[in-house]
């Protein structure tokens, strides 16, 4: 078996700096060095213990990663000469701020579909921002760095989560009994309830329920034997285009893998069905029985 080929990819800032002797003047090199020193000092003050050598070293690694992230975003190609030109023409601080803005925008996206009141807390938001910055932008100049690729992966993942959360928020606003105002949101639970209750037909949107309403729903389905597909079509017709893909994807899953819907037409007890519903709806269920 041939050994795996390992391609080293140092941080983009490091790759650009290597071109300085041949491609930049002494003044340009001095200005860049001064700017990078200033950024490192600022990072040390805001994100590390700037009174220790260890804090300065960590700040250096974060500066390398932050500027590299900005270069990956601003440069149109993989050409290292273009990276150097961006650094010289725009300035290292501008590039660093572009990279940090990416981290700030990423931190504003939901990490998972369980949203709590604390997610909007300023202290928690700052801690989350710092953790992301340290995670993605710690870049050793002498080692390969994958911060930009990991950043892109997280953006894609979090945008999918954001789409789920926004779909659930719309369902909550259009709940048949009026908007659900609870600041804690189990987005997957809200969507599950809407899809399960939609099979009854009529286009009514259910984003929150309790045992009494669920019992009414089960009895109605067993008595009237509605067409599940028709009910889902009515739900999709009511949902705005921006949320249709999320709802349709969940319907496809629940069509074959939802035990509540699989067992609702059997002799399964209401207690069993409600227990199964809890697995899908979670905290979106109301305990209306003592």
Image (cartoon, rainbow, N blue to C red):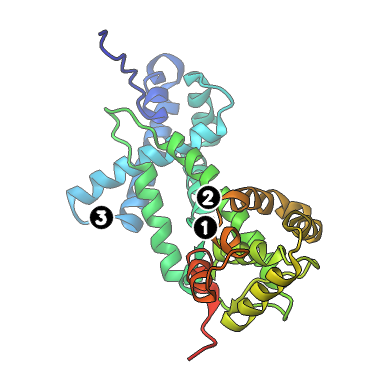
Which residue occupies 78% across, 55% down? 233
Q: Secondary structure at mark 2?
A: helix
Q: Secondary structure at mark 3?
A: loop
Q: Position of residue 243 (x, y in %)?
A: 71, 54
Residue occupying the far front of the picture: 267
C-beta proximity under 8 Å, tags 1 and 2: yes
Measured Cα–Cα span from mark 1 to mark 2: 6 Å
The one of 148 and 177 positioned closer to us in this rendering: 177
The one of 204 and 25 positioned closer to us in this rendering: 204
Q: Secondary structure at mark 1?
A: loop
Q: Which residue is mark 2?
A: 158
Q: In the picture shown, does residue 139 fall above or below 118?
A: above
Measured Cα–Cα span from mark 3 to mark 1: 31 Å
The one of 185 and 288 positioned closer to us in this rendering: 288
Dot label at residue 81: none
Q: Which residue is mark 1?
A: 110
Measured Cα–Cα span from mark 3 to mark 2: 32 Å
Q: Position of residue 235 (x, y in %)?
A: 76, 60
C-beta proximity under 8 Å, tags 3 and 1: no
């Amino acid at each position: 078996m041939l050994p795996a080929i390992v391609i080293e990819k140092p941080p983009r800032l490091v790759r650009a700096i290597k071109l300085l002797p041949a491609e930049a003047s002494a003044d340009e090199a001095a200005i860049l060095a001064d700017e990078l020193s200033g950024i490192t000092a600022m990072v040390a003050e805001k994100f590390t213990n700037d009174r220790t050598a260890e804090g300065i070293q960590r700040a250096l690694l974060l500066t390398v990663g932050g500027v590299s992230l900005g270069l990956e975003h601003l440069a149109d190609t993989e050409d290292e000469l273009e990276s150097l030109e961006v650094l010289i023409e725009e300035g290292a601080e501008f590039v660093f701020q572009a990279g940090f803005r990416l981290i700030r925008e990423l931190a504003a996206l939901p990490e998972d579909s369980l949203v709590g009141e604390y997610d909007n807390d300023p202290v928690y938001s700052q801690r989350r921002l710092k953790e992301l910055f340290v995670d993605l932008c710690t870049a050793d100049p002498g080692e390969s760095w994958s911060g930009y690729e990991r950043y892109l992966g997280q953006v894609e993942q979090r945008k999918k989560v954001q789409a789920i959360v926004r779909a659930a928020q719309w369902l909550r606003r259009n709940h048949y009994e009026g908007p659900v105002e609870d600041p804690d949101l189990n987005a997957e639970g809200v969507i599950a309830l809407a899809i399960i209750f939609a099979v009854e037909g009529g286009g009514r949107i259910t984003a929150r329920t309790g045992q009494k309403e669920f019992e009414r729903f089960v009895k109605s389905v067993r008595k009237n034997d509605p067409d599940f597909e028709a009910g889902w079509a009515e739900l999709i017709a009511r949902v705005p285009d921006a949320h249709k893909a999320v709802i349709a994807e969940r319907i496809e899953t629940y069509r074959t893998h939802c035990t509540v819907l699989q067992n609702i037409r059997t002799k399964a007890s209401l207690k069993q069905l409600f227990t199964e519903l809890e697995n899908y709806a979670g905290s979106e269920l109301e305990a209306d029985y003592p």
